[in-house]
Amino acid sequence: DLDRWRELQLPRMQYNQPATLTQSRTDVLTLTPWFAPIVWEGTFNRDILNEQFKSMNVSIGLTVFAIKKYIVFLQHFIDTAEMFFMVGHRVNYYVFTDRPNEVPKFTLASGRRLVIIEVIGYKRWQDVTMRRMEMIHNASMETFINEVDYIVSVDMDMKFTDLVGVEILSERVGTLHPGYYWSGRQSFTYERRSQSEAYIPGDEGDFYYAGGFFGGSVREVYQLTGQCHNAMMKDKNRGIEALWHDESYLNKYFLYHKPTKILSPEYLWDNGMGSPEAVLKKKRFLAVGKNSAAIRNK
Ligand code: UD2
């Protein structure tokens, strides 16, 4: 992959010059203290990035889980992904489901295909969401490594409403949770019981990352999901489950394996959350809203 970056040559392009003495955004943090960009509208040039990733012939795997009743969200999810997700690039949708026969037929744009991965549907919704780590981990070495460069893993009770493109790709990617991006670390809903593998002490923590959107190179996603799954199994054997399930373990992982790129809440928004929106110039990926009690079981 490094070779592909080394050989990359852009065509002649015309665009506004980056101004050394002017911040592209002054209202938000755009770079972490470990030099990871935080992706907000206005901080990047999509044309340059598209040229770069296009000339590397990049391919992206989007993993989603349609277990039990959540299969109802699949149609709209894929329809909107066709309009907004990685337009012009090669995409494999990996649909993990226990109901392969209920996956609708889709007509996809060229260079895009849908792969069904049959998995079991755990009884508890907490297990459904947590076991995604194990299932992605296994599929990484069985399938993803041979087919795609990057993996993007998202929730499925969602729809794309604006462009989500190669600006999100990097070695290890986390997303700011829409409910906490303005809060101090004390208010983050990290796991606070020291017996849990997901424990984060009150004086640590950078951001509160969402469980519903992470990604990276296939190798990194293999690592991340493997470590989170192992931590969950250790806790399970001790009879403890972290407060926000996979999200808690993901936050612990990102504290000590800092993301190389962070997505702003533009990439994971929930209109029902009552969050301040002043800094939000785009809503790219939106929760569709669900009756959790009715949809989570059976
Ligand atoms: C949050 C996180 C989610 C996860 C969860 C842990 C966001 C936006 N979401 O969402 O990623 O960390 O907390 O508690 O950050 N699913 C099924 N069938 C089921 C249940 C779940 O397919 O019966 C899948 C589906 O793809 C769904 C995902 O698991 O999108 C997460 O479940 P959720 O959406 O019910 O979790 P939620 O909204 O509490």
Image: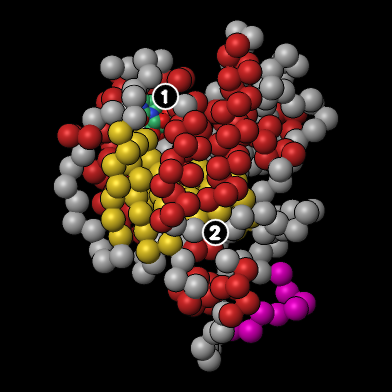
Question: Could you say whether the residue bearing mark 1 is in a helix, strand or loop?
Answer: helix
The residues tagged by marks 2 and 1 sit, at their Cα atoms, a distance apart of: 26 Å
The image shows residue 150, relative to residue 18, as above or below, that is above
Display coloring: secondary structure
Residue drawn at (29%, 25%) of the image: 68
Left or right: where 8 falls relative to 36: left
Q: Secondary structure at mark 2?
A: loop
Residue 289 locus on image (x, y percent):
36, 33
Q: Is residue 31 visible?
A: yes
Residue designated by label 1: 128
* Amino acid type assigned to the residue bearing label 2 in the image: Leu
**Which numbered dot is residue 169?**
2
In the image, the segment drawn in magenta is 16-23
Q: Amino acid at mark 1?
A: Val
Closer to us: 252 or 218: 218
Name the main secondary structure of what is drawn in magenta: loop
Please give the name of the residue rendered at 23% of the width and 58% of the height, measured from the top-left corner.
Answer: 108
